[in-house]
Image (cartoon, helix red, strand yellow):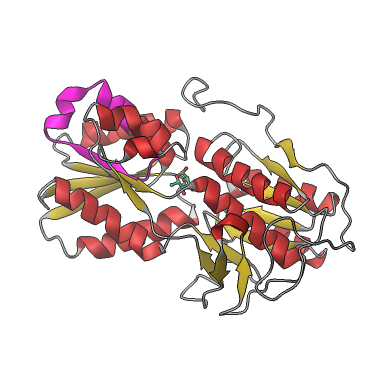
Amino acid sequence: MRSLLKRPVLFAAPLALIAVMGACSSKTTSATSTPTSGTSGTGGAIKSGLVVYFIPKDTQNPYEVIADQGGSAALTALGGKVVVSSGTADTGAAQIPSIQAAIQAHADAIVIAGNDPSALCPSLAQAQAAGIKVVSFDSDVTCPNHLFINQANTEQIGTSEVDLLAKQINSTGDIAILSAAATATNQNAWIGYMKTQLGKYPNMHLVSTVYGNDDPATSLTVLQGLLSAYPNLAGIISPTTVGISTAAQYLDTHKSLLSKLTLTGLGLPSQMKPYIKDGTVKAFELWNPNDLGYLAGYAAASLASGVASTTTGSTFTAGKLGSYTVLAPAGTTGPSVVLGPPTVFDNSNIDQFNF
Ligand code: RAM
């Protein structure tokens, strides 16, 4: 069960939509217009009246909400609109009705944060057969013919989190990971690189990885289980904004734990500020999720307009963010675009960020 108290509940319906954001024009896929902002690297124009379905991991996670708002800002600037639709639990099954809704609505593009690497592929293939362009963001899917908008370099995210913790615990002690959904592609990719990076720290030992499903109540339960199973834990990395904010809130009210336990990971500065200010957390990382959604919105609109492609080395322009280049497929990741490097937040800079 989600805790309704700890996170702003924006939508209550199980499939839910949700929200139509942006200019409310009807879909006119044949019309073209001079874009009000941004042009394509290939020189064409973004079509006006595009309808892009944003399907976040769920509709309640504040991180996902901020990302969707960025997508809406992009489509509004381009004379189109975003429809946000997803479930309330971070599972692939909960996202399938939203893909079907996009197909029914004859959307031009889908932007999805995959709760599962492969479970969504049959539905996404159906959408593509109906002419809908597919972009993944935040958490990739392993399905063919889509563009992944990555928030930062995957390896850098994983390794830097281990380094950030190592610095704070003198590279010594038992550590654990408080993750999101066990099937989340982004979480598992980062954790893979964390494990590799831990090879450089012979005195740090990963004793457990637990999954809070990006639900505050579940995150708290698995955190408490972790602390009782490993009372001498020296560090926790929580690579999820829901996990780290839940853990910070708990440590804030159990301050005696702080003499031996250090928390870091990926957090929203807006949620973490009080815990940085009172010393519960010293440092953590993230990027601007609004920019991530904005970039994904431009990518989707550019693909749907035929002015961007998934070809390695091709470019497209993302409004205020500038030009982006499509990177070559690598490993299990297909064509992708990287937003930029993560930022480390601590007491020296946290006040400068409002997302
Ligand atoms: C959570 C989600 C999201 C992840 C961020 C850092 O909100 O798990 O997918 O990118 O944290």
| Picture quadrant of residue 24 | top right
Q: Position of residue 113 (x, y in %)?
A: 58, 52
Q: Is residue 202 above or below residue 237?
A: below
- Report if residue 90 lies within the magenta region: no
Q: Is residue 238 visible?
A: no
Q: Is residue 266 above or below residue 272?
A: below
Q: Is residue 200 left or right of residue 24?
A: left
Residue sitting nearer the eye, 65 or 201? 65
Q: Position of residue 114 (x, y in %)?
A: 57, 54
Q: Is residue 153 left or right of residue 60?
A: left
Residue 77 or 137: which is nearer the viewer? 77
Residue bounds of the magenta highlight: 248-267
Above or below 274: residue 287:
below
Image height of 68 relative to 160, above or below: above
Q: Position of residue 329 (x, y in %)?
A: 52, 76
Q: Quadrant of residue 58?
A: top right
* Residue 316 falls in image quadrant: bottom right
Q: Is residue 315 left or right of 191 when viewed as pictured?
A: right
The answer to whether 281 appears left or right of 62 in the picture is: left
Asked whether residue 252 appears in the rendered view, the answer is yes
Picture coordinates of residue 100, whole percent (x, y): 77, 50
Magenta stretch: includes residue 256 = yes
Residue at the location (65% across, 29% down)? Answer: 11
